Amino acid sequence: MTVAIEKAQVAALATRVVALISAVRRAEREAAGPESAPRVESAGRIARLGATESTADSGNLEEPVDEQFRVGTMALGWDAEDRVLVLEARAETEGEDDPEEFPDDDLTGPDLVRVRLEAAAAEAFAEGALRVVASGRPPCPVCGEPLDPQGHLCPRRNGFVH
């Protein structure tokens, strides 16, 4: 399944994934005591196994990309029973400032995709996502739009090149 998501959403999601996994590890260490090893596996150990064994997705999207929907709101959580990170992405709706609550099984509500990832896979996703975001064009410090090497016509500077 392919959904459209903004670059800023990807960056925020990846940052929050790293923070959530770190918090889970910290809580598990505190609950187990100082002598126990953390129960949540680290993607760092997987990445050191070598490029052929890495969990990071290095594949390219197949063109043309046919998105199912554009993501509006996202939710991130930890399922302690199954020991997985849960990500929910809902389709963008009208009046996104105050989104209406819909039960997950409501067929009249916005589209929803739910992804469940083990900690190591979630960290690998976050690492790859941050790498992709960092490799993009830098944002204009005035309006936030992507800067081309020769600058751009900044709408906040009344069309002057920034």
Image (cartoon, grey):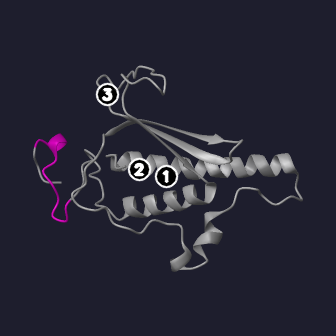
Between marks 1 and 2, how big is the CA–CA gap? Answer: 6 Å
Closer to the N terminus: mark 3 or mark 1?
Answer: 1
Identify the amino acid type marked 2.
Val
- The location of residue 104, given as percent across then percent down, is 48, 27
Q: Quadrant of residue 73?
A: top left
Compared to residue 124, the image places residue 157 above or below, namely: above
Residue pointed to by mark 3: 93
**Magenta region, mostly helix, strand or loop?**
loop
Look at 39% across and 24% down and name the residue there: 107
Residue pointed to by mark 1: 14
Identify the amino acid type marked 3.
Thr
Q: Quadrant of residue 69?
A: top left
- In the image, 29 versus 111, the foreground residue is 111
Q: Secondary structure at mark 1?
A: helix
Between marks 3 and 1, how big is the CA–CA gap? Answer: 23 Å
Q: Secondary structure at mark 2?
A: helix
Look at 35% across and 65% down and name the residue there: 135
Mark 3–mark 1 CB contact (< 8 Å): no
Mark 1–mark 2 CB contact (< 8 Å): yes
Q: Secondary structure at mark 3?
A: loop
Residue range highlighted in magenta: 148-158
Instruction: Check disc 3: other Cα within 10 Å, few if <14, some if 14-19, many if 20+.
Output: some
Residue pointed to by mark 2: 10
